[in-house]
Amino acid sequence: MVSEKMYALGAQPSAIRDLYEYGLRKAAEVGEENVYDFTLGNPSIPAPPEVNLSILQHITQDPSIAVHGYTPGAGDPKCRAAIADDLNARFGTEYSLKDIFITCGAAPAITATLAALCMDGETNEVIVNAPFFPEYKVFANNSGAELIILPADEEAFQINFPALEAAISNNTRAVMVNSPNNPCGVAYSEETIKHLANILAKRSAELGHTIYIVCDEPYRELYFGEGAVPFIPNYYSNTIVCYSYSKSLSLPGERIGYVLVPPVAADSRNIYLAVAGAARSMGHVCAPSLMQKMVTDCATVRPDIEVYKKNAAYLQEEMSRIGYRTAHPDGAFYFFFKAPFGLTAKEFSDMARDEYNVLLVPGGTFGCPDWLRLSFCCETEKLERVMPYLEKLYKEAEK
Ligand code: PLP
C-alpha cells in the first residue's frame, strides 16, 4: 500500500525529462554532436568567479564544523542581512533579515509560500496566466489549492486581464507571477504590473480578504530587455517574493534561494511564521550552509548574460526570417515559437525529434499546446548548426 496521491506524482511521466532522456540514449547511438537537445533549463555560463572563490575560501580556511554545520532554520542571519541589504540598495526598500527566509531554491520557496497562504479546510485557488512553469500545479495541489490557469495572451504574452477578472473569487488566495517568464522569456511591462496591482487591490477590498501576488523570480537577473524589470513589491505591497540563485549564479544543483515577506504586506509576521512552519512540515532543516556563506559574500554579484542576449537576438532574427511566429524574449534563456501551419506542438516536436534529432518541448505542459519551447542556454554555435533543420522543418510542415 502506498499513498495514491504521491504514487501518481512519482509515476507521472514528464514531457521534458522524457525528451531529455531520449536525447541521452540517441547521443550514445549517433554521437552527441548529432543530437540537438534544447530541453532543459540548465544554465550554460559558468558560475561567476566570485562564487567559486568564496566557496574555495570557506572550505579551505574555515573550521569544517562552521562550514558544514546546521544553521538556524530561517538561515544564517549574516546571509539574510546581506540579501536584505542588496535588495534595499537596488530597490529603495527597507527590508531586514527578519523578512528573509532562506530555502533550498525557488521550488521549496514557492511550495512553502503557497502552503502558508492557503486556508485549512477551505477551498483555495491560486491563479496563474499561461504559459506557466508546470511544477506550479504540484506546488499548489500540495498546499490544498487548485491552480486556475488563464489562457495565454498569444500576441504580447502579458496578463489576460478579462480572464483574470472573471477568475477571481472568494476562494482566490494568490496570483502567481513569473517574469521574465519560463517558458516564453517575456517580462511583464510596468503597465501590466500596475494594472494587475489595481485589480487585486480593488478585488481584495470588495471580497474582504487579501489576494497576494506570489512572485517567482529565478530569472530576475537574466534580463536583457529595455529598462529594468519592475520589482513587484514596489507596485503591490501584498507581494511575497520567491527567489532562487539557480539561474542567476548558475548553481541549480546547489539548491539555494529565499522567500521575502515584506513587512508592509498584510499579516506579514504571521505569513513569515507560516512559511517557516510549512518549510518545517516539508522536512526543511536549513539550506546548505556552504551556499549560505557564499551568498553572504556574493549577494551583490550579477552574472554576465551576454551569451543569452546574443542567442535570443539570433533566434529572434533567424526564426522570424524563416517565417515562424515567435514570442519576443526579454530575459531568461527560453525561446517560444508557434508550431507552423496548424500543426500541434506535439506533432511538430515529434517531427523534429524523429527526422533531425532536434529536441524541443511541446507547450501543452506550459498551457500553450500550439507553442514550443527551445532552451537556448547553450553556445551560439549550436543554434547556428540547428538552424538549417528548423528551416527544413518549417518547409516540411507547409506541405
Ligand atoms: N520557477 C521557475 C519559473 C523555474 O523555471 C524554475 C526552474 O527551472 C523554478 C521555479 C525552480 O527553481 P529552483 O531550481 O530554484 O528550485
Image (cartoon, rainbow, N blue to C red):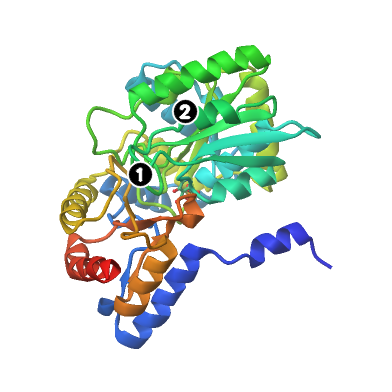
Residue 221 in sight in this render: yes
Q: What is the three-letter code of the residue carrying label 1?
A: Ser
Residue at image x 63%, y 19%? 210
- In the rendered image, residue 171, in percent from the top left (x then y), is placed at 69, 29
Contact flag, marks 2 and 1 (Cβ < 8 Å): no
Instruction: Identify which residue, 348 or 138, lies in the foreground.
Output: 348
Asked whether mark 1 lies closer than 8 Å to ligand 1, one says no
**Horizontal side of residue 146 vs 375, given as left or right:** right
Q: Residue furthest bottom?
A: 29
| Residue closer to the observer: 77 or 46 | 46
- Reading the image, the residue beneath label 1 is 248
Residue drawn at x 52%, y 32% is: 163
Q: Return the residue nearer the eye: 341 or 13.
A: 341
Q: SS for tag 1?
A: loop
Alpha-carbon span between mark 2 and mark 1:
30 Å
Tag shown at residue 371: none
Question: Mark 1, residues whose alpha carbon is within 10 Å: few (<14), some, or many (≥20)?
Answer: many
- Residue 45 vs residue 111: left or right? left
Q: Which residue is mark 2?
A: 161
- Compare residues 181 and 350 and report the one nearer the observer: 350
What is the crowding at mark 2: few (fewer than 14 residues within 10 Å), some, or many (at least 20)? some
| Residue 266 percent coordinates (x, y) | 61, 16
Where residue 336 sits in the image (x, y, percent)? 33, 51
